[in-house]
Image (cartoon, rainbow, N blue to C red):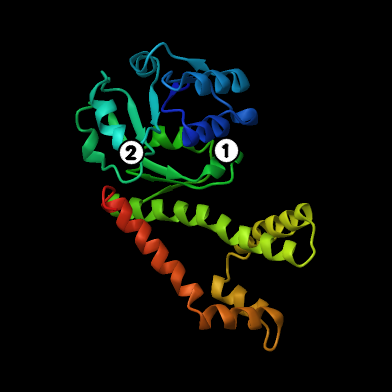
Amino acid sequence: MSERIGILGVGHFGGYLVEGLSRGARSVPLVLSPRNAGRAAALAARHGCAVAASNQDAVDRADVMLLATRPDDAAVIVASLRWRKDQVLVSFCGGVSRAAFSAAPATVVRAMASAAVAAGESTVVVWPEDARVRSVLERLGPVLAMADEETLESGTVMYGYYAMLFGVMAEGESWAEKHGIAPDAAREIVGLAFRGAGLMRLRDKDLSTEDILRSLATPGGLTERGLAVLEKDGALKSWGRALDAVLRRIKSPKRP
């Protein structure tokens, strides 16, 4: 018998989960929490989901519940509901520790992914490893078990990294348009550049990323010239500082 899957919280990320779990031959029946009634109804109509009468009804109807509420609300919402010992609660709430859900007798697993789960193009990091959770989340993309909760939070940072890449894309599109390239063409050039780079990285598994970069940045070439400017300006190292800042925010979410 297949697991009954519920989603508690159908904001932006919850919507991406619905899309990902409703894709193609691997789609599964879902029950959605009703609080964001308009969005829940729209997702249900588009993907054939059920909408629960209440949060408690959603929990009662699910074997595996995916939690995608605002992190600040997550622990309070979970504590307000009745859970069964045979259920699994999978929290996609960044920065909320597993211990925060101790009021629920269900098995608690933390997870994180990027918005690209909607298209089946994201990894999913989880901790701790759980066979039931893996069987559900593998519908979204490769599931990577982290060694401990601290490592899970480091993995969470990488999905912030994913989102920040759109800032780099926007800069490239803007530059192209300023130099006479039509907006549609600029979007296609930049989008395929990022997709191509990702595919090359995944294809050439025996090479380090540094090896691939060296093969592209030939002496005296265009790539070498551009990288020299980025390195002189500290632009590449600033990415590490940005990721450190995201990790600090995850570990201290109320800090400004």
Q: How many marks?
A: 2
Q: Nearer the viewer, residue 22 or 131?
A: 22
Task: Give the percent coordinates (x, y) of residue 77.
Answer: 28, 26
Q: Residues within 10 Å of mark 2 (few under 14, many from 20)?
A: some
Asked if residue 107 shows in the view, the reply is: yes
Q: Is residue 62 left or right of residue 104?
A: right
Asked if residue 148 shows in the view, the reply is: no
Task: Give the percent coordinates (x, y) of residue 239.
Answer: 46, 67
- Picture layout, residue 25 above or below residue 128: above
Q: Earlier in the sequence, mark 1 or mark 2?
A: 2
Q: Residue furthest bottom?
A: 220
Task: Give the percent coordinates (x, y) of residue 113.
Answer: 46, 45
Residue in the picture at 49% in, 35% down: 12
How far is disc 1 from disc 2 in space, using C-alphas?
20 Å
Residue 180 got which mark? none
User: Does the residue at mark 1 contact the one at mark 2 (Cβ under 8 Å)?
Assistant: no
Residue type of the residue flagged with mark 1:
Ala
Q: Secondary structure at mark 2?
A: helix
Q: Nearer the viewer, residue 86 or 229?
A: 229
Residue in the picture at 54% in, 46% down: 122
Residue holding disc 2: 71
Task: Give the percent coordinates (x, y) of residue 95.
Answer: 31, 46
Residue type of the residue flagged with mark 2:
Pro
Q: Is residue 178 left or right of residue 209?
A: right
Q: Residues within 10 Å of mark 1 (few under 14, many from 20)?
A: many
Q: Secondary structure at mark 1?
A: helix
Residue holding disc 1: 118
